[in-house]
Image (tube, rainbow, N blue to C red):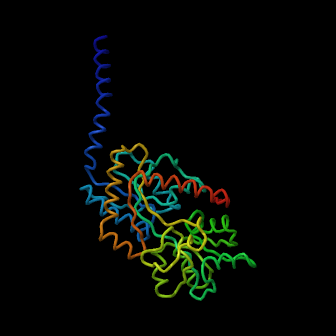
Amino acid sequence: MFANRRTLLASAVALAAIAPLAGAQAADAWPARPIRLVVPFSAGGANDLLARAAAEGASKALGQPVVVDNKPGAGAVIGTDIVAKAQPDGYTFLVSAAGVISNSMIRKVPYKDADLTPVAMIGLAPSVIIVPANSPYKDLKDFVAQSKKGAGIHFATAGIGSTPHFVEGILSSKYDAKLDLVPYKSGSESVTAVLGNQIEATSEASIVVLPYLKSGKLKALATTWTQRISAYPELPTAGEQGFGELKIAHWAGVHAPAGTPAIILDKMAAAVDKAMKDPATVARLKGMGIEPVGGTRASFVKFVDEERKRLGDVVKATGMRED
């Protein structure tokens, strides 16, 4: 009996020693089957377009299909939760956006921030502050100055915690702009309201508004990213107009379930970086108003950490919270 116990104990010890080796070998062999890329937004938007560009390029680099799976809803919470609860085996990733940082600050979510780990930056669509084509506002400085007079300016958002909401939050908390929030269900509805002169202003992704700007149907006051938009270089940044703290974009990155082996994360980051440096991809995305980024896993971790601190400060200053 004791001999049997010693045999069983020895087998258990042997298995425990072998398990990490097997896991390491599996990570070295990754990917051995198709990879699922969950997009927590509907098809056709900036995040979805960036996801598909990254998936196509990463698939070539990794030698396995990278399949985009749209799971929209609840401000990106539904798709994010799917990935947060997925096996950390390198076969399920999230196309993340600012909500992966800010959602837990402003609403109840069914996962913890620590359930996800940053992998790679894909790219971004700079946000653009827009007004009707016949608006009297000359630029962002004039817009903010005029907002402080009278009852203020009606400013549309795509809901609580959306990028336009953060644009308003930064303008009001950092620069004392007087803006009256008008929430819509989506950014496209907000833009339509500005086109119809029903709302005085909003902020939306470059890929959405550029066609209207180039046709003269809308007027742009500023882009809220650190650099001018490649496809619309005549538009000054908010920083160039004296609003250096107004820095926000509709970005897309890749997150993985916590516990995914580092070797897999590094391989995925390298594949995304290679995809975003492909000349044909760069030309196609920039032509639509999207800026490819890529970079290392470390650079994306740094970006996420900085955004968490910065957006957290805006949430606290404005009391941004879903009721």
From the viewer's perspective, is 5 left or right of 173? left
Q: At which x and y percent is residue 323?
A: 65, 59
Q: At which x and y percent is residue 240?
A: 56, 73
The one of 23 and 150 positioned closer to us in this rendering: 150
The one of 162 and 271 positioned closer to us in this rendering: 271
Residue 126, above or below 260: below
Quadrant in which residue 191 is drawn: bottom right
Residue 315, above or below 115: below
Residue at (52% x, 87% y) in the render: 217
Residue at (34% x, 53% y) in the render: 268
Residue at (67% x, 68% y) in the render: 175
Q: At which x and y percent is residue 236?
A: 53, 76
From the viewer's perspective, is 60 left or right of 283? left
Residue at (56% x, 87% y) in the render: 133
* Image quarter of the N terminus: top left
Quadrant in which residue 47 is drawn: bottom left
Q: At which x and y percent is residue 246?
A: 58, 67
